[in-house]
Structure formats: C-alpha cells, structure tokens
Amino acid sequence: MKTIPQPPSSAGTAASPTAEPSDERGRCDFLHSLLEYMPDRIYFKDKQGRFILVSKAEASYLGAQDAAEIIGKSDFDFFDHELAQAAFDDEQEVMRSGTAITGKVEEKLLLDGRTGWALVAKIPMRNEAGEIIGTCGISKDITRLRETQDSLHEALSAVASQKTQLSKSLTELNKAHQELKTAQEQLIDFQKLQSLARLAFGVAQEIQNPLATLELGLGFLSNQQDESAAPALQGMAAAIARVEVVIRALMDGATATGIVLKPGEAADIVRQAVDRIQNAKSAF
C-alpha cells in the first residue's frame, strides 16, 4: 500500500507545498471527498496509535468541530483506559502480524456517557517500500441495530416465557377438566343413588302397611288364649320384628343423612337391602 496522500487543510492536515501530478491531485481530491462525506468513521494512525488523518464523521464522534483538533492525539485522550488499551492492542497486533481485522464488533462508550456499538475493520498501512507505518481503521456505527437486536432478543425471551406459562396453564386446564369430569360422574352416581333411595323408601312403605295389618291380626290371635298356638304366634311376632328392622334400615338408607358419595356404593346398598328382605322372608 502506498503512503496516504495528505488532504487539504480542512481534513485535518496541510496540503503539500510542491506541485503534484494530475492523477495524484485526483486521488487526493477523492480521499478528501471520502473523508468529508462518508458517514462511517475513518481514521489513520501512526505506529504509536496517534491520529494522523481522520474523517469528518470520526472528528464529530470524538467531539471535535474540526478534524485538525484530533491530529496527534490517541484513543487515550478520549476514552477510558480499558477501552483505549483494547483498541491499541488490536492495532499493535495488526502491525505485528500484517493481518487485517475485519467484522469485529466493539463496544464503545460514547462521549455523552451512552454505550454504543461499532462494526470495525483495521488494516495495516504501508509505505512505498512495503513497510508497515501505521494502521487504517473504518468504524460503522451499529448501535441502533444492536439495540433492535437486543429488543428482539427480549421479545423472543418474553414469547418463550409466555409459551411456558401457556403450557403450564393448559396442563392445569386439563387437570381441571379431568376433575370436572370426575365430579360429573360422581354427580350422576349420586343421582342414581337418590333414585334407588327413593325406590327403597317406597318399597319400605309398601311393606310397612301390610305389616301393620299383620301386627293387628297377631295381637288379636294372642288374646284368644289358645295355648297351642302360642309358639306359632311368638315366631310370627319375631319375624315381624325382624321385618321391621329391615324396613327401618331401608328407610334410614333412603334419607340424605349418612349418604357418602362414593363410586359403586349404590350397588352395595341394594345388595344389602335384598339380603335383608330375603332373610326376613325366610323367617316366616
């Protein structure tokens, strides 16, 4: 790479006092236009890291009104020691290895205290003899892009969190649905149980009415003083008493008191009632 030509004084350095060929003047004008209008920050530094040429955008970034104010200074004059040292170390490595650094994202502490980000390229600067005499850097501000990226990352994290919460809510909803389904099944069983209880209560009443007639007849026969019939009458009285026990059990079981909602209990109650009625019949 040839030695960088000196731009006019408005770019931060003085023009050469000697006459230049037309092609050299054209390159100088081109460089001046590039440094004047390029929105990316461009700078040239010597081997000690001091600015020797900067663009208008770089001068504005460093808080200067004129690029000439920056010449001869280094990053240590504008940034905290840690950031300036990191930039200096990169430039020294570029000059030592002769290899450019491209596409590096650097965090920048802006002069107003805000944190900025830049996409940086640093290349070795050589003279006509091929000797490295410094570095050239181009820095593109990507602060807004980085902020957008961070906002997008936060939004994606929020979406992921909402997705997790939604999955949790669906699990709880499924659990609630199963509990509701179980409650509905229990309600159906309870309604069946109530129907059976009403049926049992009606059966008990139907038995109780003729049983009362039998008790009256048994009382009448007992008053006839027929000793030979006494054992039979006593047996009938005992049978009637057992039937009354069964009837009271049926009527007690038919009331709401004491009913516990459990699947399959209705079948047990009916089975017990049938067993008691059969036992009562066998006593006659």
Image (cartoon, grey):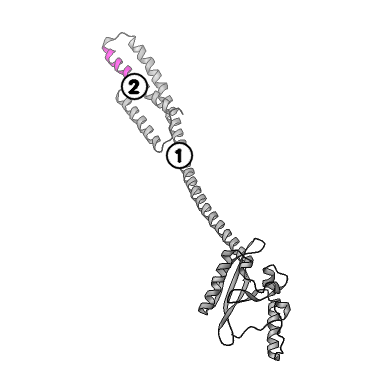
The label shown at residue 252 is none
Which range is magenta? Answer: 228-242
Residue 102 at x, y percent in the picture = 56, 75
User: Which quadrant holds residue 43?
Assistant: bottom right
Label 1: which residue? Answer: 186
Whether residue 229 is visible to the viewer of this picture, yes or no, is no
The residue depicted at 47 percent of the width and 43 percent of the height is 179
Sequence-wise, the earlier of marks 1 and 2 is: 1
| Image quarter (top left, top right, bottom left or bottom right) of the C terminus | top left
The residue depicted at 58 percent of the width and 78 percent of the height is 134
Residue 129 at x, y percent in the picture = 57, 87
Q: In this view, does 27 lie above or below 201?
A: below
The residue depicted at 31 percent of the width and 18 percent of the height is 238
Residue 157 at x, y percent in the picture = 55, 58
Label 2: which residue? Answer: 242
The mark lying in front, picked from 1 and 2, is 1
Label 1 amino acid? Gln
Label 2 amino acid? Arg
Q: Is residue 175 above or below residue 73?
A: above
Mark 2 neighbour class, 10 Å CA radius: few under 14, some 14 to 19, many 20 or more: some
Q: Label 1 vs label 2: CA separation?
A: 34 Å
User: Which quadrant holds residue 239?
Assistant: top left
The residue depicted at 34 percent of the width and 12 percent of the height is 221
